[in-house]
Image (cartoon, grey):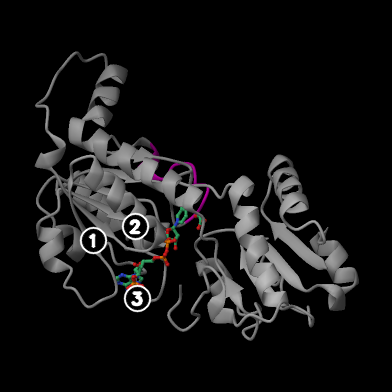
Amino acid sequence: MICLLCGDFDPSEEAAWRAAFAAALPQALLWRLDEARATPRAVQVALVANPPPGALQGLPGLRLVQSLWAGVDRLLADATVPAGVPLARMVDPAMNAAMAETALWAVLSLQRGFFTYAANQRAGLWRTHAQRRAQDLRVTVLGQGQMGRTAAAALAARGYNVQGWRRDGQALAPLLASSDVVVNLLPLTDATRGLIDASFLAQLPRGAGLVNLARGAHVVDADLLAALDGGQVGHAVLDVFHTEPLPPGHPYWQHPQVTMLPHAAAFTDPRSAAAVAAANVQAVLGGAPAQALVGAVDRARGY
Ligand code: NAP
Ligand code: GLV
């Protein structure tokens, strides 16, 4: 079986994927894009992590596109990804657990003011502030899928008052009005792009925290910066950005109320994820319907 393995991997990441797939899918030959281009008819499966636009066109034997990323917004934005081929996103409990750790770190740091203490150290300030309990914080988790549910459970187990939001028609306004911290774990779709704008932020209690672990385009940056500068948002923890890497000189880099990560909230771990992808490959080649795949993407829904 011929699989295209294609993504923005560095050499060590690619080596880790090759080793993991050699164990999980030993019958597969993993081709790079140039090899696939040389004999496009032979490629049956594409295993992709942010492939360059156009990478998946002209592969007439393709039977599965398996994303090695959880979010498929970039794949769905690429009109050349063949619409009739089943598309699955990565669903891996190890990745969910990593995301829950990041959410926990962010919320705990906001609860106890650890970001403020870190800034005070840099400023040479010895200054304490009030010590809040987990029970004092109401945390809203936007998105109750793989990541959101796992993060919400970890936060609730730690003692926070957690509420979740999903696509079930529940009104967002009352949730925002009762949120000391909002954690965003939504997929990026037409319905969620730019959701976190001035009107969204104005509905939060003054000084609330925002934790964006999903996609940069969920946030209207100018609105968030205005809300931070005006004190409506007390602190933002941002893992994801409109442009990545975040360009030098962007106001987030030096903003005293912003803590940044370099899109590192939860990586896919080949040690467990290769087996998840392999099971989908075996299923599709065995004739399973697209809906039976783990992480089957509903293109109409956008996630
Ligand atoms: P998922 O399992 O597909 O869950 C998506 C959740 O969002 C579902 O609960 C869904 O509602 C809800 N949702 C979708 N559209 C909505 C809308 N318009 N209004 C309200 N709720 C809506 O996705 P996941 O695996 O948890 O991943 C979520 C996102 O995390 C990914 O798409 C990706 O962008 C991001 N991510 C980031 C990193 C990182 O390192 N920063 C790593 C992995 C993933 P229903 O339950 O009603 O369907
Ligand atoms: C990372 O952002 C992912 O979607 O897996």
Q: Amino acid at mark 1?
A: Gly
Q: CA distance from mark 2 to mark 3?
A: 17 Å
Looking at the image, is mark 2 or mark 1 earlier in the sequence? 2
Mark 1 vs ligand 1: CB below 8 Å: yes
Asked if the residue at label 3 sits under 8 Å from ligand 1, the reply is yes
For the residues labelled 2 and 1, say whether their Cβ atoms are less than 8 Å apart. yes
Name the spot of residue 209 as percent of width and height, x first: 21, 46
Residue 50 locus on image (x, y percent) = 61, 60
Q: Nearer the viewer, mark 3 or mark 1?
A: 1
User: Does 200 sit above or below residue 261?
Assistant: below
Image point (14%, 53%), residue name: 179
Residues rendered magenta in the picture: 243-253
Query: Which quarter of the image is occupied by the N terminus?
Result: bottom right
Would residue 50 be seen by someone viewing this image from the given angle? no
The answer to the question of whether label 2 and label 3 lie on touching residues, with beta carbons closer than 8 A, is no
Compared across the picture, whether 11 is left or right of 294 comes to: right
Residue to which mark 2 is pinned: 148
How far apart are the two marked residues, 3 and 1, measured between alpha carbons? Answer: 17 Å
Q: Which disc is residue 164 wearing?
A: 1
Residue under the image location 19 percent in, 36 percent down: 111
**Looking at the image, is 234 positioned above or below residue 279?**
above
Instruction: Please tell me which of labels 3 and 1 falls first in the chain.
Output: 1
Q: Nearer the viewer, residue 238 or 250?
A: 238
Q: Is residue 36 left or right of residue 285?
A: right
Q: Residue tagged by mark 3?
A: 191
Our reading of the magenta stretch's main secondary structure is: loop
Kind of residue at disc 2: Gly
Real-space Cα separation, disc 2 to disc 1, in angstroms: 8 Å
Determine whether label 3 and label 1 are within 8 Å by CB.
no
Amino acid type of disc 3? Ala
Q: Is residue 270 above or below residue 30?
A: above
